[in-house]
Image (spheres, coloured by chain):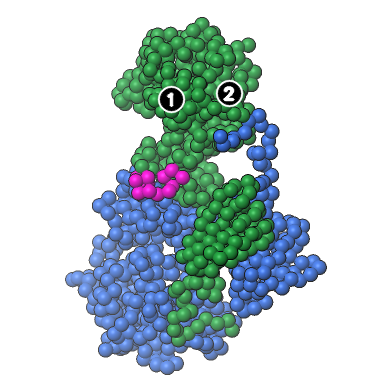
Chain colours: A green, B blue
Amino acid sequence: MTQITPVLLCGGSGTRLWPVSRKAMPKQFTRLLGQDTLYQAALTRLSGPGWEAPMVVTSEAYLGMACDQAVAAGVVPADFLVEPSARNTAPAILAAALHLAATDPDALLLIAPSDHAIPDARAFRDAVMVGAGPARNGQIVTFGICPTRAETGYGWLEMTEVPDDFAPRPMSLAGFVEKPHAARAEQMLAAGRYLWNAGIFLASAQTLITAFETHARGLMLPVRCALADATHRHGIVRLASGPWARAEDISVDYAVMERADNLCVVPFSAGWSDLGDWNAIWREGSSDESGVIIDGDVTAIDCHDSLLRSEVSGLELVGVGLTDIVAVAMGDTVLIAHRDRAQDVKEAVARLKAREAAQAEGFVTDADQWSRTEAEGMQYASRCVQITQSTEKTVPASAPETRWTVLAGRAFVSFPNEVVALTKGTSVSRQQGVAAQIRNPDNAPLVLLEVQEHRLTQKVAEHPTPFAIAAE
Amino acid sequence: MTQITPVLLCGGSGTRLWPVSRKAMPKQFTRLLGQDTLYQAALTRLSGPGWEAPMVVTSEAYLGMACDQAVAAGVVPADFLVEPSARNTAPAILAAALHLAATDPDALLLIAPSDHAIPDARAFRDAVMVGAGPARNGQIVTFGICPTRAETGYGWLEMTEVPDDFAPRPMSLAGFVEKPHAARAEQMLAAGRYLWNAGIFLASAQTLITAFETHARGLMLPVRCALADATHRHGIVRLASGPWARAEDISVDYAVMERADNLCVVPFSAGWSDLGDWNAIWREGSSDESGVIIDGDVTAIDCHDSLLRSEVSGLELVGVGLTDIVAVAMGDTVLIAHRDRAQDVKEAVARLKAREAAQAEGFVTDADQWSRTEAEGMQYASRCVQITQSTEKTVPASAPETRWTVLAGRAFVSFPNEVVALTKGTSVSRQQGVAAQIRNPDNAPLVLLEVQEHRLTQKVAEHPTPFAIAAE
């Protein structure tokens, strides 16, 4: 049986599935459909008999998530290829091919995005295996999705002939069509010899390298150097940042595929989506007879063709009389969009970023929130704080009166005239007007309970009143 | 100048302005329009030259809010009349009239809901003064709103003649019309001699008492007894619950107004709304040229005729391509409704209540939320808890390991074999499997810092992996 190595691309982050997908947690690592993340589903889909352990191409920022989620999914990647900076798909794919060719130039690579939905994994694996023959014979095999609508958001593939059906078999490819206007998309849908370009490719390592040498020669030196100077540790290959920065920022379509003449296409018609926006998530999900998909703590009254998601347990989302609405509620953000305007979520994120709202790219998490309660003219605010290994935190003199209790680890709290050493269960208070530093001296995390006392400045009871509330 | 005593009714709570208005914080005490609450706006509207200090009729549950908000608005009510149970408007108005008649039977009472919007307060005060003459002459003066649409949600008033204009002057009243069907409402709007019934009445205490004696005689004894046995303390008159419970639960319209023959009406056309649902809030607010009203941390992209409110600072609400939508985001709840379906918010609340969601009537507040942090396979959750005077809290044996530290007040913590007394700054731990009771022995509040320790059951680092992430 042919062995194929999946190369999963998961270094990117978009904004059209905000607020679930943010720069701090991009789409491929989120649970947009089902229980697994999209990346986990991709790992699982491309595993089993006939499949080598995958190679994962990602960035330093997402390496931790990529490792953790792979382990949780029960799939252990052979290598993580870490890009020092974002350079689009062409350099990443060349690096993967060169890395694999060092041990086996004939290895077959299935290059695939990690953030798409392919509900029938078995059908997809079968289609890939159909491409293995031509791939072994020096072809670059693309996988073309049988189109179901005149989609203007995708690139398209043109076949040389109109097939009788869309059963997976290698067919010759006439060329690539860039994202079309609506009229052109209608024509292509009607013509019957156009497929959506899913950005999935199968080829041997050597075939890919030759294609790059022929069509994108300028990429060879920087990528080879980045790989030659890479650091290897525990299966993690960190490409060298200097040479990598000199690689052109270009997609594999532009750099290689649209110029190569050894391409063929295998049609795939068993279901695929790039989950490009919230409307696509609605389209791929399981709706009730009214076309409504709910997820989490949601109450929908007389809604139609809508997607209502509460991402936080206990956060009640209620929809009344809605049609064609996408609503996503999180602890720090609520998005409500008309389904037809799902693409414009990108614009909303850009506006939030412009006014420096933290939610544009990150999460305002629970850990940043204080629990508060009031009593007798005082407000008490408490939170848990974690200080990672061998770092310190400075508290200015202006901060309110604070008490710290150690829950785990050890702390050295420095005041102007003394240093207090704290172990688990012990505590120290800081008066207002006195600066302090808290240091974690150990490699283990330090967890502190921080309590602030604020005197409430405007207390109703302090107003002179002719009446008072009293229990009888 | 005639002195008038405002009688503000603010004991009720509805559900159509949920989630801002909930049973725990009804509409009249919320900031639905402008900086003041509706109750504060009503207090301010009915004050100044010619106005006595107001009487506020409310329930025990809302007495604290009614006092605090009056003080914050700078208006000091003469009396708070506290209803032991909800009995609709007739018994409340009779109690107010009897209470005032005890010192001055000729006192003029303006009875008004506290949850309506009247933007032009001065015009309204002028209209009320127009009614003072007939009121002093034994008439019950109603205020009828010049209708602007065929509203089926209101009762209507019929005048005996079609006025030349709707300038405020006393006119004779032909009768009351209950909430009409749409066709009837259209007829009344066209006829020109119908006004909306705003539920606002002006009459002397004696006139009102006589009307009740004539038309609702059964209410006299229970209300007189509830007042006779009331407790008086610091300007708070708590009606006696026994006799009050025997008063019929009936509106003043049914009990008295629709039967009385000494009624007249003063038209008012300077703007009024009962703010009956979110659509009314949208109608009364200040919108931009697209008909969009935003409030709080909101980004609206290409929205039309919509109301977007974020009630929590830092909670980002984003609307994209919305038309005729009302959206209200709070920390524990998000409501999204089509404007035409605003009345059905009531139904949503009923459903939440049926499944015992706390948000139906109360607030899941910050104080209920835990701050969490994780370290070394443990999760630490902390929060401040307040235990009010002389009450106790029971912690079941099954709860995770807990530590309590007293921030204010005193606590008695009872374990099966011992009782620990805690003062400010001291703490005690509870092992899992041991039940405990915490008691506040004092009249002052007890504030506790509660920390739970959870062992994380599924920790990624515990899986065997062939790789590890390491800093170089």
Above or below, B447 relative to A338: below
Amino acid, disc 2: Pro
Disc 1: which chain? A
The magenta span reads: A351-362
Residue A74 visible in the displayed image: no
Mark 2 vs mark 1, CA separation in Å: 25 Å
| Residue A87 point in image, percent of width and height | 41, 27
| Residue A59 point in image, percent of width and height | 49, 32
Q: Secondary structure at mark 2?
A: loop
| Residue A298 point in image, percent of width and height | 52, 48
Give the quadrant of the N terminus of chain A.
Answer: top right
Q: Which residue is mark 1?
A: A243
| Residue A381 point in image, percent of width and height | 54, 63
Is B457 inside the magenta-drawn segment?
Answer: no
> What residue do we see at 32% from left, 60% from top?
B285
Q: Secondary structure at mark 1?
A: helix
> What residue do we see at 36% from left, 74% from top?
B42
Q: Are marks 2 and 1 in contact (CB under 8 Å)?
A: no
Hey, which residue is sitting farthest left in the picture? B164
Question: How many residues crowd mark 2 within 10 Å: few (<14), some (14–19), many (20+)?
Answer: many
Q: Quadrant of residue A122?
A: top right
The disc placed on residue A54 is 2
Q: Nearer the viewer, residue B318 or B56?
A: B318
Q: Nearer the viewer, residue B325 or B227?
A: B325
